[in-house]
Amino acid sequence: DHALRDTVENSITNCLAFEQHG
């Protein structure tokens, strides 16, 4: 089941995108 890993990777991606945006 990839659901948890997908969520984690999505959170990391959002974090990185947020840092780059700031």
Image (cartoon, rainbow, N blue to C red):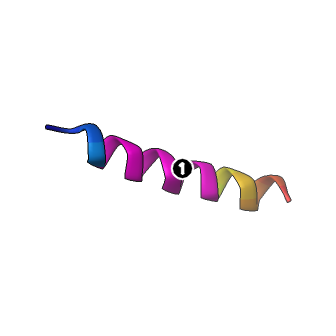
- The answer to whether 17 appears left or right of 4 in the picture is right
10 Å neighbourhood of mark 1: few (<14), some, or many (≥20)? few
Relative to 18, 11 lies left or right: left
Residue nearest the viewer, comparing 8 with 22: 8
Q: Could you tell me what secondary structure mostly forms the magenta stretch? A: helix
Q: Which residue is drawn at the image coordinates 73% and 62% (left, top)? A: 19
Residue at (54% x, 50% y) in the render: 13
Residue segment shown in magenta: 5-15
> Residue 7: x and y, percent?
39, 45
Rendered view: 19 above or below 1: below
Residue 18: name its quadrant. Answer: bottom right
SS class, disc 1: helix
Residue that carries the numbered disc 1 in the rendered image: 13
Question: Residue at coordinates 51% horizontally, 51% vertically from top-left?
Answer: 11
Please identify the quarter of the rendering in which residue 16 is found: bottom right
Per the image, is 6 magenta?
yes
